[in-house]
Structure formats: structure tokens, C-alpha cells
Amino acid sequence: MGAGAAVVTLRNIIHSAVAMMVCFGSLAGMYALLGAPIVAAAQVLIYLGAISVLILFAIMLTQAGDANLPAPFHRQVPVALVISVVIMGLVGWAAIQTDWGMATQAAEAAVDAIATAVFTTYALPFEIISLLLLVAIIGAIFLARRPEDDERAN
């Protein structure tokens, strides 16, 4: 949880990306502790390996790595705190109300069933998410470019 907070609060974008990698790694550890080593390995390979490297590559490509960004959301802190407390309360209430005995039975899905579902039933949403990630990276590059470096700005 601390690394997740660091992702959105650190001003140095490289430090933020490293904190995001810590989040991905801890999530993989949680998957492993929950008895899902295949999902943990996929988390490490896809998110910790590929996505993190892609994001760091995009940061280095835009040369925004050394920029300390200002805090643009400082006026929204009180509203964000209220909303986050409400969301945490809802998550806590849902965790208390959940029958965790039934969750172990639901988690006993075979790897073959998951692979079949991802590559047949959910193939289109999977591809849409990959396209969305590509658009997000292109948008980040566009937003991070410096106008003085752009020859079209003159």
C-alpha cells in the first residue's frame, strides 16, 4: 500500500515508476501466497517485466526522467481524502460481509479453463485493453514533450 501511495505522490517520475514496479512485485507475491503460482508468474513476466520496461522506455524516450513535476492536484487533496476514506470504508465493509469459505471453492479453477476463457471468450476485451495501453503510452509521450523541442511549435 505504501508503494501504491508513492506512485501517485512522488514528484520524480522515475521514482514513481520504480514504486509502481514494487507494487507489481508485491502483487505477484500476493498471488503466490494465495496459491496461484501461474498467475504470479504471469504478473512478473507481463507487468513487472514488459509493462514496467515499456513505461520506463517511454519516460526515457520523452526525456522527462530528470523533470521534477509540480503538484498540480494540491487543491483537490481534501476532496480526494474524503473520497478515499469512503472507498476504503466500502472495501472494508465488503471484506467483512464476504463469505470467505466460499471464496476458496471459487478459486479452484483449472489453468486450462482460464487459458481457454482468455483466448476465446475474452479475446476481444484482452485486445481492447492492449490497445488502450498503447494509446495511454502515446498520450503520455504527447503530454510529456517539450514545446521548445517541437519544430512545429515555431
Image (spheres, grey):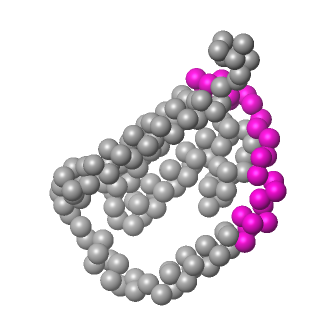
Residue 72 lies, with reference to residue 82, above or below; the image says: above
Residue 1: within the magenta?
no
| Residue at the (69%, 17%) spot, across then down | 153
In the rendered view, does 128 fall on the left or right side of 80?
left
Question: x, y percentage for residue 67?
Answer: 75, 31
Along the viewing direction, whichever of 139 and 112 lies nearer the viewer: 139
Number of marks in picture: 0
Name the quarter where the N terminus is drawn. Answer: bottom right
| Residue at the (65%, 15%) spot, across then down | 152
In the rendered view, does 135 fall on the left or right side of 119?
right
In the rendered view, does 70 fall on the left or right side of 103?
right
Residue 61: within the magenta?
yes
Whether residue 111 is visible, yes or no, is no
- Residue 105 in which image quadrant: bottom left
| Residue at the (80%, 41%) spot, across then down | 70
| Residue at the (57%, 78%) spot, across then down | 90
Along the viewing direction, whichever of 20 and 140 lies nearer the viewer: 140
Along the viewing direction, whichever of 36 and 11 lies nearer the viewer: 11
* Magenta residues, start to end: 59-82
Along the viewing direction, whichever of 14 and 89 lies nearer the viewer: 89
Whether residue 112 is visible, yes or no, is yes
Question: x, y percentage for residue 14?
Answer: 66, 36
Question: x, y percentage for residue 26?
Answer: 52, 55
In the rendered view, does 107 fall on the left or right side of 99?
left
